[in-house]
Each structure stands twice: as C-alpha cells, then as structure tokens.
Image: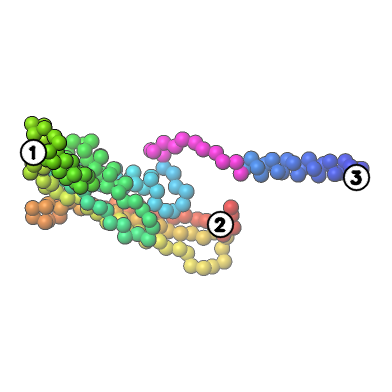
Amino acid sequence: MSRNRMLGQMLFLFAVTAAVILAGCRATTRDVSPEEAIHYDEGYDFTDKKSIVDSLVTSLINKSPLAGRNDQPVLIVYTVANRTSEHIETDGITDDIRQKIMESGKARFVNKVQRDSIQRELAYQYGGSVDAATRVQRARQVGAEYMVSGTLRSITKEQPKQVRLKKKTLQYYSLVLELTDLESGLIVWTDSVEIVRESSKPFIGW
C-alpha cells in the first residue's frame, strides 16, 4: 500500500471520528410532558414536587376538617420551611398546593403575598383621588380560619469508600404539611410524603 493511500485512509478515519464526536456534542432539545417522571440524579426535582403536592392535597381535602365543610373556609398559606442542605424554592410547593385546593372548591385563600400591595391600593383610594362612591370599604377583609404550613427535610447517605466501579447514593426527602386552627392554635390535620431514591454513578464518566 502506498504512503499516499495510507495517509488518505488515516485522514478519512480522522474525519469520520471527528464527525461522530461533533454529532454527539451537539445540543438537542425536546418538549417534556409535566406528567412524565424524569430524574437526572437523586436530587429533588419538578417530578417530586408534583407527586408531593398531589398526595398532600388529596389527603387534606378528603379528611377532617375540610372534608366535612361545604362553606369553603378561608385559609392562609405560610411558608414551607426548607430544612434540607439544598437550595429548594419551596414557594413553588405552596403555590401549587393553594392552586389545587382552590380548584377542588373546598376552600378559599387570603392573599398573604400581596398584603402590602393591598394596603397601598387602599391608601391610594382614600388619598383623595378616587370617587368615594367607588372606593372599597375598609375593615371588610375576610380573616383566615386555618393556616397551612410545613417543613421539608432531607437525608443523604453515600456508600463508604471501597474498591468498586460505581458509587451509590441514597437520597431521602420528607415533607410534613399541617393545617392549624387559628382560633384555637390546634393542629387539626397533618400528613407527610416521603421520597427515597437511590442513584448509581460510575467513578469515571462524562
């Protein structure tokens, strides 16, 4: 085989290899259904949020005291405390809980987040620029009967150091939700959801 022919074959193989590598490195996107369970690692993700919210809301609206009420009691949502070592935006959990309870028709909600904005609007309406006949009446806001709050916790366990090709990690999450009667201060409902996920990762990889 001539030197030029060998060189040509080598260049061809190099070009094919480069093309394969470049094709593998090319970014791609696809639409994913919110109903599809996808986990890239053992950490908390949107799939976990959906399953947590669905489970806890089902429990809340089907158990006492909400299950026996037909008058849509007024609730206020306070924060879900993040007691994990991760930066998890728990407002997304409380927002989804409020939305699903409202969709069920079992309760109404005080808008805690916009209280300052409501007060500013009331101050404007009574500042002299708004016709008195169209102003909303003060001291007519509805007080909440129950408060929704909760705590998110996590535990991470890793396999001890040994000679192995893969390393396993066990991730545990627990969300406890509570419904408190604001008049008595008593917890009138509580439930929890647990998620346990094991991941296995090679020591060498991309």
Q: Determine which of the numbered discs, if any, sits on residue 137 in the image.
A: 1
Of residue 27 and residue 129, the one placed in the foreground of this image is 129
Magenta residues, start to end: 25-36
Q: Label 2, on which residue?
A: 202
Q: Is residue 158 left or right of residue 56?
A: right
Asked if the residues shown at circle 1 and circle 3 are in contact, with their CB atoms under 8 angstroms apart, the answer is no
Q: Determine which of the numbered discs, if any, sits on residue 196 in the image.
A: none
The residue type indicated by label 3 comes to: Arg
> Looking at this rendering, what residue extends furthest in the right direction?
2
The residue type indicated by label 2 comes to: Pro
Foreground mark, 2 or 3, reads 3
- Quadrant in the rendering for residue 11: top right
The residue under the point 47% across, 48% down is 40
In the rendering, at what x and y percent does residue 190 appear?
Answer: 20, 52
Of residue 193 and residue 106, the one placed in the foreground of this image is 106
Q: Circle 3 sits in a helix, a strand or a loop, which is it?
A: helix
In the rendering, at what x and y percent does residue 133 appear?
Answer: 8, 31
The residue under the point 57% across, 59% down is 203
163 above or below 116?
below
Q: Label 3, on which residue?
A: 3
32 drawn magenta: yes
Q: Circle 1 sits in a helix, a strand or a loop, which is it?
A: loop
Q: Is residue 178 left or right of residue 128?
A: right
